[in-house]
Amino acid sequence: MFKQITTIIGKRSIYSLSTLSKSAQSTGRYFGTAATGDNYKPPSCVKEEPSKKKETNVESISDEDIIALVDKGEIQSHNLETRLPNDYRRAVHIRRKLLARDLQREHQRALHAAAVVAAAEKAATSGEDPSSIPTVSPPVTNLDFEKSLINLPLDHYDYTKVLGACCENIIGYIPIPVGVAGPLLLDGKLVSIPMATTEGCLVASTHRGCKAISKSGGAKTVILQNGMTRAPVCRLPSATRAAELKQWIETQDNFYQIASAFNSTSRFARLKSIKVVIAGRLIYLRFKSSTGDAMGMNMVSKGVEKALEVISEYFPETEVLSLSGNLCTDKKPSATNWLEGRGKSVVAEAVISGDIVRDVLKTSVEALCSLNVDKNLIGSAMAGSIGGFNAHASNIVTALYIATGQDPAQNVESSNCITLMEPINNGKDLYLSVTMPSIEVGTVGGGTHLPAQSACLDLLKIRGANVEKPGANSEQLARVVAAAVMAGELSLMSALAAGHLVRSHMAHNRKVQPKQEAQADTISMTHNLPHSD
């Protein structure tokens, strides 16, 4: 056994010495006589000759031959689509085979190494003669990566819409169930809400909330502000100079000059404000701009770069450290987004009839209002929450974002929400509202152009850009998000107040296991939803 280990170590040592030798030969011109030769030139001065080797036409060769070229380094795995421009599906298939093979080899090596170490430790503990230990054979594994990847879908997907836009090194796609909640009567119109989720009860619960709101006259929404933000961080020679830049930016004529440069980068970007924050000699400039029907991060970033050019003309010593200085704030909890807003700031409200609270939601107005204070307000305050004064806003936000091609990571700030409930009409009815200051959505760009996501936007009648009123489609999506969150809040809070939460999850969030395999085809997949009448 120790001979095996010594042999392995010895081979590695020989390899290392060989590698070092070759490295020394290749870099020898930097040392001794090679570096002082008359014809020596530093690498930076040597013009590299373009490769004259003709690329292999891989479209006409087999998958195995392509894999061999990848192993030789003649083709990069991430460039398979480029080399197979007429068959992206084949490129993805070959990448899967490469991945499965490499994972299998690495897994087998790891198991073998573990077995060798275990045998050596056993011999050392027992005092056994190392020379008598038999050769350790690679253990057999039941893990088959190629078989596992069969469950990751490959076919029936248009990869041309993904490459260069949504994902790299593609090996397949994840199918996520999409349910529909509603219809919800929203601002006088019925809307059906697509939700992509794997959490049982979520769609059913949101559906019940939609039903209660619609039966009570519907929801109304208002958009308080609309503007995407980007905040670069810059450094100046001193805090004094940083303060002078702040004062310069906040002068109206100078702001107009910056805005003119910013707005020149897009037909839809219109700079609204620049909030300046100073820390020592660091200065953070939080640009806020309208972005039409796009979520707008890239659009705003492009405008910010142009604006910084103008600032640098007047303050040439300004050192731009990063285009994003985290005051934006993107995909991170922050008081800035909670107080200042980002994207669309929306309020949704509804009055729920006391009869509906009793008959549909199975609770009372008094119980709901009391629980909302104790849980969503006091409980969240005790937790030190920022923007988390709600029951589960992020549940609905994320499900809607995945369904409609938004950036799911932006649920962090988009889920900022405070849910308020109060009794009205002498305590008979319930006034309900959600205030969400930073909903970040778009109906163009990102994943909105993918077929499935486009279909969900079609259900909402807001796919693409609104030609007549740019920005109207993305604003409508933000309204839908807020109203759907309100429906989800109403239903979950009612379930908690009535003590139904665990019961509903046990009924709808657990996989049914048949007693006998033969009975699998006869199991009913229908449920008597606790949220229905």
Image (cartoon, rainbow, N blue to C red):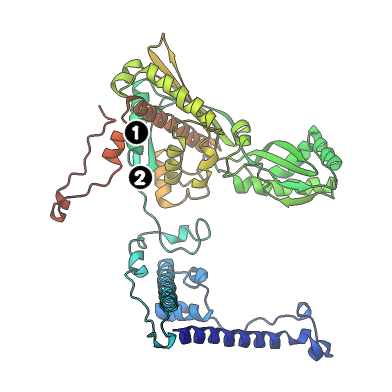
Mark number displayed over residue 205: 1
Q: Quadrant of residue 23?
A: bottom right
Using the image as rendered, state which of residue 86 and residue 227 is in the foreground: 227
463, above or below 17, in the image: above
Q: Earlier in the sequence, mark 2 or mark 1?
A: 2
426, above or below 291, in the image: above
Please report the residue visible at 46 percent of the width from the left and 63 percent of the height from the top: 170
Q: Which residue is mark 2?
A: 178
Please report the residue visible at 34 percent of the width from the left and 28 percent of the height from the top: 495
Q: Quadrant of the N terminus?
A: bottom left
Residue 407 visible? no
Mark 2 residue type: Val
Using the image as rendered, state which of residue 314 and residue 421 is in the foreground: 421
- Indicate left or right for 332 with 95 as reference: right
Please tell me how crowded label 1 is: few (under 14), some (14-19), or many (20+) other residues with Cα within 10 Å.
many
Please tell me how crowded label 2 is: few (under 14), some (14-19), or many (20+) other residues with Cα within 10 Å.
some
Q: Quadrant of the C terminus?
A: top left
Using the image as rendered, state which of residue 403 and residue 242 is in the foreground: 242
Mark 1 residue type: Ser
Q: Nearer the viewer, mark 2 or mark 1?
A: 1
Secondary structure state at the residue bearing disc 2: strand
- Indicate left or right for 325 with 113 as reference: right
Secondary structure state at the residue bearing disc 1: helix
Q: Which residue is at the far front?
A: 127
Please report the residue visible at 64 percent of the width from the left and 40 percent of the height from the top: 229
- Indicate left or right for 234 with 148 as reference: right
Percent x, y of residue 214: 36, 25
